[in-house]
Amino acid sequence: MSRRVAGGLVWVAVCGLTAAGCGSGSRARHAGTAADPYVIGMSQCNLGEPWRVQMDADVRAAAAEHPNLKVIFKDAQNSSLTQRSQVEEFVDQGVDLIIISPKEAAPLTKPVAAAYQQGIPVIVLDREVQGDQFTTFIGADNVKIGREAGTWIRETLGGQGTIVELKGLMTSTPGQDRHSGFLEGLELDTHPGLKIVFSGEMEWLEPNARREMESALATNAKIDLVYAHNDPGAHGAWLAARAAGRDKEMKFVGIDALPQEGQQYVKQGILDATFLYPTGGQEAIDVALKALAGGTVPKKIVLGTRLFTKENIDTGGQAIR
Amino acid sequence: MTRGWRAALGEWWATPVARALVALALMLLIGCVFNADGAFFKWSVHRDMLRQVSVYGILACGMTVVIITAGIDLSVSSILALAAVSFAWLTLPEGWPAALAIPAVLVIGTALGSVSGVLAARMRIQPFIVTLAMMVFARGLAKVVSGGMKITNYVQEPDGTSHLVPMPRIFGMIDSRVLGGNVSIVTVIFLLCVLATWIILSRLRLGRHLYAVGGNEEAARLSGVPVARTLVMAYALSGLFAAIAGICQAAQETQGDPETGMGYELDAIAMVVIGGTTLAGGKGSVVLTLIGVLTIGYLQKILSLNAAPEATRLMLTGTIIVCAVLFQRGR
């Protein structure tokens, strides 16, 4: 009985594989029409993070505008080696273009270069690979976003006030950059009235942010503003302040501004401001269309950010270049 | 009085509870020294510490039961996440009343725990392997239930439109405080879990069976203990407690996050072991676990109050776990 079931399963699997093989085809290039659309392979390093789920959603939404594009999505589940084989699979499948948001630079540089050298344009999103064997890199600048946040905070507080900083994982580049940019934007040297009274590491996690904020509340009688390196952190801080009955005393600023997270918090009046960490999904499809049409595209695109506050949230935020 | 007070004190000192209490007292002493400008002397700091450790503590209750049977349950953190997203999904987009959603989530947790128990007890797969598999499986299931996204009161309809639903009252209720704002509800839930575990371990026949199975499985079998059923009960209880913890986690985060609770199983194990319950099984109690939970909770609180950098925290936590266990073992 079980052998028959197993046999059946194998048979189904073989049929499935054959069908998949026929479906994707082994032709070199597609015509790029609605009947024979360009095939784009998108390899995402880890769909466990909401921000990366959003990146795939942005790519999907942007591609849906163009009937001559078809995108195949793959999730490497946080493994560089899986991601490497996904790139190789895309090449074997004969896709017309590859979008990759790599987990790490070193292990993915070679497979990306191999695909690029076979004439397949490769767009690298968010994290870089080494060298120049790719078509375009699109990414955001955390130092710049941190600087914008720092500047906004300095101006909003009028150069006077006590600040709590809840930091992301400080062994990660985004954590370091969002911290150093923030300090640049605050200009503490020329604004002695601004003070960072508590600085805790919450490793991007909401429960940890709440714990750190409770410590900040216990050790500081007055807090004017909380700057968290991501929106869940700012939300955790707000929960702590509300539990202590002190949420009205201070402002909350976060980063990332995901539509279903930070932007909603601003809408609900939980956060006073959040700064978009753009996914680049829309831009990747724009560049892809140009590259597929044989046009020239820039080697590197640095994305701007958007500021969301209560005033501008319903009109889509304010762009900061 | 036939014995001198010295002898009585010596006897008391030899008990695991006394050792655990001394370790906790030492931790409190450290807190008094590094009091962060007097913050450590405020009740609100202790209240918040108790709230923070409650979810871990609830997991540790179930972990104590499993460890007493000489087993281990690595799946609690994933069952917590599954419970959190299930609870958020049922109450927010689906709009179930809490009176239905809570029992449903508890059934899910208990069922998954029972599956681990059956695999360990009837199929004779090692608990470490079984619960490792369940840890991965339940995390995946949590992602399926939630569609990989956090479930919040911002609900997306299949047609692409979205709207805000009001936060059900149950979330605010679980994340509120009683006794004049001095004790968090989650802490009350944690203490009730400790009480329930204590009753099971010390007052019910099941408790005697759990200790017997953990002490010597073969001897227990020969003396008529239903070994397999006892083991299944242990893992089912652990799953139940993980589901309770998941509901508390969702209420405190005001969302169901499929990634929540990552690594909590190790904290729960550390709390049980620091209390003095040994991984070898057959020995220990939930009172010890309660003390262990408080010891780790205070350690984290003191480090946080003094804004110790993450690297220092991790190193100190590791060192103190080893010291506490050595201290437990005796002179």
Image: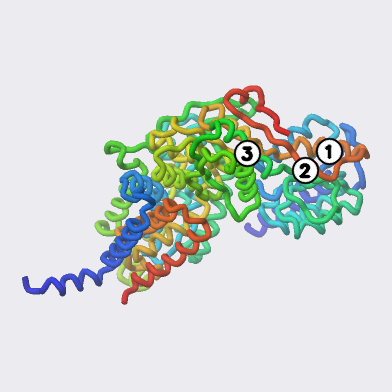
Q: Label 3 is found on which chain of the structure?
A: A
Q: Which mark is residue A138?
A: 2
Q: Label 1 is found on which chain of the structure?
A: A
Residue A140, image quadrant: top right
For image coordinates 37% across by 67% down, the residue present is: B324
Q: Left or right? Give the position of B159 relative to A156.
A: right
Q: Position of residue B65 (x, y in %)?
A: 37, 59
Do tag 1 and tag 2 residues touch (Cβ < 8 Å)? yes
Structural distance between the alpha carbons of marks 3 and 2 = 17 Å
Q: Position of residue B265 (x, y in %)?
A: 47, 57
Lower sequence index among marks 3 and 1: 3
Q: Which residue is mark 3?
A: A256
Q: Amino acid at mark 3?
A: Asp
Q: Identify the element where label 1 is drawn.
A: helix
Mark 1 nearby-residue class (10 Å; few <14, some 14–19, many ≥20): many
Whether residue B86 is visible:
no
Q: Amino acid at mark 2?
A: Ile
Q: Identify the element where label 3 is drawn.
A: strand
Q: Which mark is residue A71?
A: none
Q: Is residue A40 above or below residue B229?
A: above
Q: Position of residue B64 (x, y in %)?
A: 37, 60
